[in-house]
Image: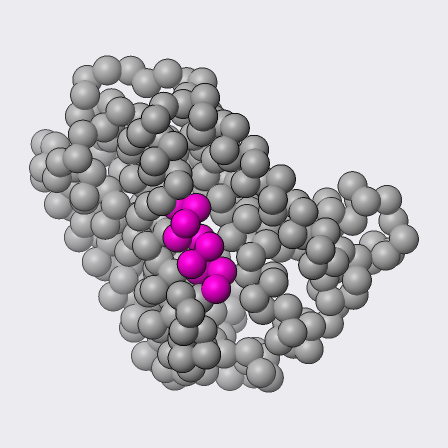
Amino acid sequence: MISVNAPLPSRIGAYLLERFPPVAYTVLVGLFTASAYALVEHQTEASAAFGAALRAGAVVLLVFLHLRLMDEHKDHEADAVAYPDRCLSRGVVSLPLLFKVGVAAVVVQGALVLSLSSQAVVSWLACLVFTVLMRFEFGIGRWLNRHLLVYAISHNPVVGLLAFFLWTVAGGAADLLMWLYIAIVSVGSLAFEIGRKIRLPEEEVAGVESYSSVLGKRRADWLLAALRLLTGCGLLWLGMVIGQSTVGAIALGAQVVLVAVLLSAPRRAKLTEGLATLGLLLDFVFVWVIAC
């Protein structure tokens, strides 16, 4: 366990491994970016510039990082009690330090976006403003914290805004393909969020709400299953629109199999989270395959 006296880079690295695993998030954002660019290339019949795609993906990765850092500030008091072994709770890193890291992340985002296009700047600013609203919970945090599902839905549009950012940077037009893509990644990410917080009764943490504690385990499972199936239907629709109905049907079938596993037997929270993560990754992969 890392000491509070360890060098600063080691402490920041330990925090990231604990709360923002770089490899996992890079894979996720890489697939997110690739799926958007693949669809735009299908739409425009023009190859995208790899350098621009790389910079756009880096912006999205850093947005997710500053969202995580904002969450640490929002939830610090409750997390310090519920999770005393975390780096922030033990003082390995501090809120002022994480604030500085967050500011640095936003500055780098801005520099990268300025190297892209004016449209990219506008769509990134929309994302940034929305994340600030999320940080202050739209001014109704006390009410939102009593309505966990509404809380998740109210924060979900940030994913759609990031999808729009990638679409804009890639040079896509605002047509049915764009809206289908935004809908697929938005619903898929909501399913991921729900799946991260479904636990068996013995796994519930005192003072920390989960969808299973609020809705009941079975209802939370069915909600996750419904969102996965809805995402699958979106993938089928996308496949039909661009002449890849077979791939779209396979994508829907994969979601059906995933749902069957989710509903088949009790499973620990880590497995549920893993299945929810797999579902989101499959969304991006199937979008990319359909586009190709």
Query: What residue appears at the point 23 percent right and 28 percent down from the top-left corner?
Result: 172
Kindly indicate the quadrant of the structure image that contains residue 276: bottom left
Query: What residue appears at the point 58 percent right and 40 percent down from the top-left corner?
Result: 105
In the image, residue 64 above or below residue 259? above
In the image, residue 42 above or below residue 104? above
Identify the magenta region: 127-136
Q: Is residue 163 left or right of residue 276?
A: left
Measured as percent of width and height from the top left, residue 21 is found at: 61, 47
Query: What residue appears at the point 55 percent right and 61 percent down from the top-left corner?
Result: 71
In the image, residue 175 above or below residue 169? below
Query: What residue appears at the point 32 percent right and 41 percent down from the top-left corner?
Result: 163
Image quadrant containing the N terminus: bottom right
Measured as percent of width and height from the top left, residue 102 is found at: 60, 47
Measured as percent of width and height from the top left, residue 30 is found at: 45, 34
Inspect the magenta stretch and tell me whether residue 272 lies in it: no
In the image, residue 201 above or below residue 26? below
- Give the colour scheme shown: one colour
Q: Is residue 242 left or right of residue 26?
A: left
Measured as percent of width and height from the top left, residue 235 is found at: 20, 45
- Count of number-bearing discs: 0
The answer to whether residue 39 is visible is: yes
Inspect the magenta stretch and tell me whether residue 135 lies in it: yes
Kindly indicate the quadrant of the structure image that contains residue 230: bottom left
Q: Would you say the magenta stretch is mainly helix, strand or loop?
A: helix
Along the line of sight, the residue nearer the viewer: 84 or 95 = 95
The answer to whether residue 188 is visible is: no
Image quadrant containing the C terminus: top left
